[in-house]
């Protein structure tokens, strides 16, 4: 057992206790209030994290509660570890309170345990271990904690205006060994007049497969149940909205158009992109009814992931054209092109060496459909926190991280800091 691992084992209870404190804060995006751009709870989570960093002797900065950071020493940072303290809403289907950390048989369950409060705590204890073990670093390292990763990442944009990110950045917001490629992404919000008296409620966030769809008429109420999954891996879930649409036989032109465009079981968007849909994912993830000017409208959201070789302008043109020709209005659209970092760079190769040394497993670079926290950061990669073939029920009920995984993440991050900055 290395001295770093021994230190982490000796401080495991402190790690878990602090994680429980963070989990207790429902840091989902809320309306902006004074000095809290994403709501009071997100700001509270950041405050608690930075206070803990100060307690451990690190100098901290808070950029107007968008994001904050902690520095190991007074050297200019060469490496940043970027994690986030906001979470997606809890949804339904939990076997215990999502904001009370449940500890059972070495498993820690709660919203944010794997995405991304657990990894954030691991990064702090990695840096604390190096400091308290008096392991010297020749370069600076900075932990950066954001509060809006789940809803657009404006937090890091604001932070970077005051404190530009260093040349090497990794985030424990993905999986091992190293994610150096990420598909492009579109998020589309739409509306249309419903033309029928229904009350529809489905989906909570645009980047998750909806697990329920409630439909009420003047004479009946039906709950369509599906299975939640991250929008980048919709094949792991079952879409409750498309389940409803497949069953729909009413008179609404808008719903009948959506029924044709978003067919139940089609996770690639074949009806939109045709034979060119390979490596695409396309999820209608939000749908609800609203009343405006004595008329009923449906409003919804769509998440699309697309591969290298395609651009956001090209892809958005195809899907928006399809929707608009069906009489559906595009209210807003945001997107990013695919992200890639050279796997042969010294930075990436250093991370792969550390992964192999600590885990004994072969390191390699992978491409994913999900967008991690470094998607818009040149040269950035994701390094953890999930392991290949593993699952922490990210964005789903009973999200979890094991105690061993929490310790191993901290160990890997400490060794990566030592490798790159020592």
Image: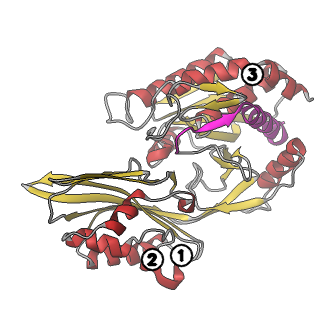
For the point 60% across and 51% down, the residue is 374
Q: Secondary structure at mark 2?
A: helix
Task: Please report contact status of discs 1 and 2: CB closer than 8 Å, yes or no.
Answer: yes
Q: Secondary structure at mark 3?
A: helix
| Main secondary-structure element of the magenta-colored stretch | helix
Residue 105 occupies which quadrant of the picture? top right
Measured Cα–Cα span from mark 1 to mark 3: 45 Å
Measured Cα–Cα span from mark 1 to mark 2: 7 Å
Residue 107 visible = yes
Picture layout, residue 321 above or below residue 104: below
Residue that mark 2 sits on? 314
In the figure, is residue 291 to the left or right of 223? left
Magenta stretch in the rendered image: 396-422
Residue that mark 1 sits on? 310
Tell me residue 163's x, y (percent): 55, 38
Tell me residue 373's x, y (percent): 57, 48
Residue that mark 3 sits on? 12
């Amino acid at each position: 057992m290395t001295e770093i691992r021994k230190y982490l084992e000796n401080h495991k209870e402190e790690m878990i206790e602090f994680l429980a404190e963070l989990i207790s804060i429902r840091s989902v995006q809320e309306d902006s209030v004074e000095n809290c751009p994403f709501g009071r709870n997100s700001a509270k989570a950041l405050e608690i994290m930075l206070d803990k960093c100060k307690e451990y002797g690190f100098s901290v900065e808070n950029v107007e509660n968008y994001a904050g950071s902690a520095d190991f020493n007074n050297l200019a940072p060469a490496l940043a570890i970027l994690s986030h303290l906001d979470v997606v809403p809890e949804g339904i289907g939990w076997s215990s309170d999502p904001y009370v950390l449940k500890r059972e048989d070495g498993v820690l369950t709660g919203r944010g345990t794997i995405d991304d409060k657990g990894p954030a705590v691991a990064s702090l204890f990695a840096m604390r271990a190096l400091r308290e073990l008096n392991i010297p670093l020749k370069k600076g390292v900075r932990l950066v904690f954001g509060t809006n990763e789940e809803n657009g990442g404006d937090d890091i944009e604001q932070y970077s205006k005051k404190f530009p990110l260093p040349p090497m950045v990794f985030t424990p917001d993905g999986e091992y060994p190293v994610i150096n490629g990420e598909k492009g992404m579109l998020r589309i919000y739409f509306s249309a007049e419903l033309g029928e008296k229904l009350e529809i409620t489905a989906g909570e966030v645009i980047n998750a497969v909806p697990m329920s769809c409630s439909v009420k008429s003047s004479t009946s109420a039906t709950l369509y149940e599906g299975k939640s999954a991250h929008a980048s891996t919709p094949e792991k879930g079952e879409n409750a909205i498309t389940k409803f649409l497949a069953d729909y036989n009413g008179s609404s032109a808008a719903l009948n158009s959506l029924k044709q465009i978003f067919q139940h079981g089609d996770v690639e968007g074949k009806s939109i992109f045709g034979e060119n849909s390979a490596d695409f994912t396309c999820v209608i993830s939000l749908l609800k009814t609203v009343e405006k000017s004595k008329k009923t409208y449906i409003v919804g959201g769509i998440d699309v992931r697309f591969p290298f070789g395609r651009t956001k302008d090209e892809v958005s043109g195809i899907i928006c054209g399809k929707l608009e020709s069906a009489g559906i209005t595009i209210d807003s659209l945001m997107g990013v092109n695919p992200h890639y970092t050279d796997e042969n760079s010294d930075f990436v190769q250093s991370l792969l060496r550390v992964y192999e040394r600590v885990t004994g497993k072969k390191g390699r670079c992978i491409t994913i459909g999900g967008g991690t926290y470094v998607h818009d950061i040149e040269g950035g990669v994701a390094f953890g926190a999930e392991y290949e073939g593993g699952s922490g029920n990210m964005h789903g009920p009973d999200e979890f991280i094991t105690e061993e995984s929490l310790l191993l993440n901290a160990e890997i991050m400490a060794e990566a800091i030592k490798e790159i900055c020592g």
